[in-house]
Amino acid sequence: MSRKRVGFLFLNVGHFLDHFFMLIFATAAALWLTTEWDITYAGLIPYATPGFIAFGICAIPAGWLADKWSREGMMVVFFIGIGASSVLAALADNPGQIAISLTLIGVFAAIYHPVGMAMVVQGRVKTGVPLAVNGIFGNMGVASAALLTGFLIDTLGWRSAFIVPGMLSILIGLLYLFFVYTGHKEQKAQAKTVKSDSLEAATLPKPTLVRIFGVICFTTAIGGLIFQSTTFALPKIFDERITDLAATATMVGWYAFVVFSMAAFAQLVVGYLVDNYSLRTVFAFVSILQAVFFFIMIELDGTAAFVVAIAFMLVVFGQIPINDVLVGRVTRSEWRSRAYALRYIVTFTVMASAVPMIAWIHGTWGFSTLFVVLALAALLIFIAVLLLPSSSKVLNAHSASTA
């Protein structure tokens, strides 16, 4: 296997771990810690909020350091730092202590998206499929968080759900450090030519760029709200709505894993479509499907709820690579990490606000109201997408690929 493919594999594993660590607590809180610490679900999950805030805010300094210092070095810090923080979380004895550990996890998790995304698109013209493959690994991390956390809770206790992946991440970080060290000379040679063979930004009029970035920021914010709400709440939704199918933590984890796993591969389809067709058309179609499936889900339970959950997660995950492709097409390599950092600080700041929102809506009205909110949010994305220029070369895959 070539060094480029090995490096891409490390980036994919990193994306897996990034989302995995951010959702361990969601499953542990829903299925175990509420009982052990004698606190309600609505009262416990806000302790995850500082971690999600750090997940967003720290993306900016992470992107700056990556562009100014070393993207590879920042990835080493990511693997080892997030693993050590997870091990620390296992030592918590109360909600306050685990909130500190989750904040540290968020700080190190913030490194991945501005750094990893920039490394994935570096040197590529058609970026939809590579970003989709990378996105699948991230979503498999989401899926595996529910599955493996539930399994570890049932077999070894909730602390093992943080310790086992934490130690694995530290090991991977050391392996990546060795990989970077042994290929240092080769990477230095590649760095000298990166500007000549990397994706160049399309030349667009300033008003068009402003409009595109406005749509990116808005759809990123609303999309982050939808993604966080569905991925964070799904184990609890299944715990309440498919009780006839899932009666244990492990079974809830399995059903969440099945849904997330199936949905993750929608990114490959969307990645192919945005590489070969109008990004605006693909984006609009995906967003309107989200609204439809959320409306259908409002009062469902049992097998029907499980089937529709697969449907809405397909389009929620399918949206993920679209904005990343768009950012890659309009930014240059030398400041691409900072551009992705800006996009993801918007995403994760909104995602942080989604956690207390879930607690408030669930505690006051239940999940039916949450699905009404998500359906309306998806409609807002659809309207925003219609504001994208219909004839821009950035939105035309063929023109972008030959720019």
Image (tube, rainbow, N blue to C red):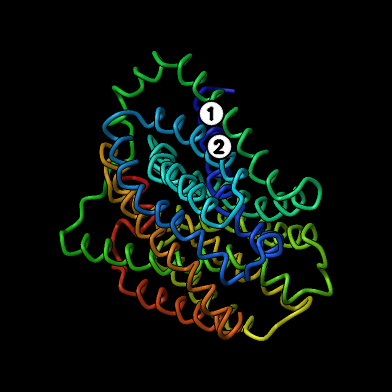
What amino acid is found at the position of numbered circle 2 in the picture?
Answer: Gly
Given contact means CB atoms under 8 Å apart, are the residues at marks 2 and 1 in contact? Answer: yes
Is residue 328 visible from the viewing direction of this image?
no
Instruction: Return the disc, 2 or 1, that comes first in the chain's sequence.
Output: 2
Which residue: 27% across, 31% down? 195
Residue labelled with disc 2? 83
Locate residue 349, reporting x and y percent.
38, 60
Spatial separation of the CA atoms under disc 2 and disc 1: 9 Å
Q: Secondary structure at mark 2?
A: helix
Locate residue 153, reporting x and y percent.
75, 51
**Residue 334 placement, left or right of 299:** left
Residue labelled with disc 1? 173
Q: Nearer the viewer, residue 389 or 363?
A: 363
Q: Is residue 287 above or below residue 68?
A: below
Point out the image quarter for the N terminus. top right
Point out the image quarter for the C terminus. top left
Which residue: 83% across, 70% down? 245
Q: Residues within 10 Å of mark 1 (few under 14, many from 20)?
A: many
Locate residue 300, reporting x and y percent.
70, 83
Mark in the foreground, 2 or 1: 2
Name which quarter of the figure residue 259 lies in: bottom right
Q: Is residue 48 above or below residue 372?
A: above
